Image (tube, rainbow, N blue to C red):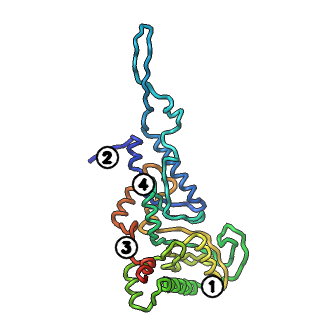
Amino acid sequence: MALKLVKDAPTVWSYLNGMVNLYKPAGVSVQQVRNTIIHNLCRDLNKLEVRPSLQRVVIENHHDSKLTVRRVEDLSDNVLVTGPRYQPEDVKCRFSANHGRFTSGVIVLGINDGSNQAFRLQRNRPLRVYRVTGFLGKATESHFAESRVTLRATIDHIGAEKIGRLLASIQASHQRKMFDLSGIDIQSQAAYELACKGTIRPANNSQPMIYGIRLAEYRKPFFTIEIHAINETEAYLGELIHEIGINLKSCAHCTSIRCIRHGHFVLEDSILKKDWNLQNLISGMAHTNKLINQHPDMLQEHSSSLREMEETDQ
């Protein structure tokens, strides 16, 4: 069946409901991303064939005493009076994660009815994967490269093996913390059965949890680590880099944070800023719908969580 080009704005608007996988550039806030998406959608929708102006009935009295009834355009509904048909207030948007200004990479946005899906995805707390790059030998006020340098230290004694051992100990401590919060001995059969059910999630959104951390690249003084985490924030990742520098008997600060995966949303499928237009966003929604059909657990997780354990203990 041949595809038909749709030029009718109301028809396109009816399909503008869902989630899209966007690539957020570094140095841009999520509010700026939201404003850009809404502006581009309204711009492209208003370029299509929008609905015509409303009609009003006019009764005219001619010189021969005959009344004429006819319909004319209602000028109060003309676009020159009311403005473009699609306004920014008409578009609803919601992000499933609140990345900071310095974080780049995957961010999932729900548009119109997709805002409910984005809220469910956020509540489900899927794993997010980051590539975080740090700089050894310098510490800053905010733990990021944009702020003032407060401390300098030597890094000659630091090698990739030493960083790898430290990251392994950090991962082990977080794994023990998961079971401690659930009140289960990590060496018990109950802990084994709980781990077999799936990812153990915190009971609330305020507890950052690292599920995996490894050294991805080391080019002194730069080092890049891959982090699998839940409930993390940009400030938490910056503090983590700072603590890694201290534990290495030196100092460090964060130079970049990039989210490469959010649940089943991967970096390769994210839409770049230059492609944030109506056509690409609707195509992205279609791809997201297929992804949700393949992985319905993204919106409703049935694996184990600390909340379920607390209810069982009661």
Give the number of marks: 4
- Mark 3 and mark 2 residues within 8 Å of each other at the beta carbon: no
- Give SS at disc 2: loop
Tag of residue 247: 1
Query: How far is the residue under mark 1 from the one under mark 2?
Result: 60 Å
Q: Which mark is residue 3?
A: 2
In the current view of this chain or complex, which residue is farthest to the left? 1
Q: Amino acid at mark 4?
A: Asp
Q: Residue at x 57, y 55 (%)?
A: 32
Q: Amino acid at mark 1?
A: Asn
Q: Label 4: few (<14), some or many (≥20) within 10 Å?
A: some
Mark 4 or mark 2, which is nearer the start of the sequence?
2
Residue in view at x 47 percent, y 83 percent: 182
Give the structural element (helix, strand or loop) at label 4. Answer: loop
The residue tagged 3 is 302
Q: Residues within 10 Å of mark 1 (few under 14, many from 20)?
A: few
How busy is the neighbourhood of tag 3: few (under 14 within 10 Å), some, or many (20 plus)? few
Q: What's under tag 3, amino acid-wise? A: His
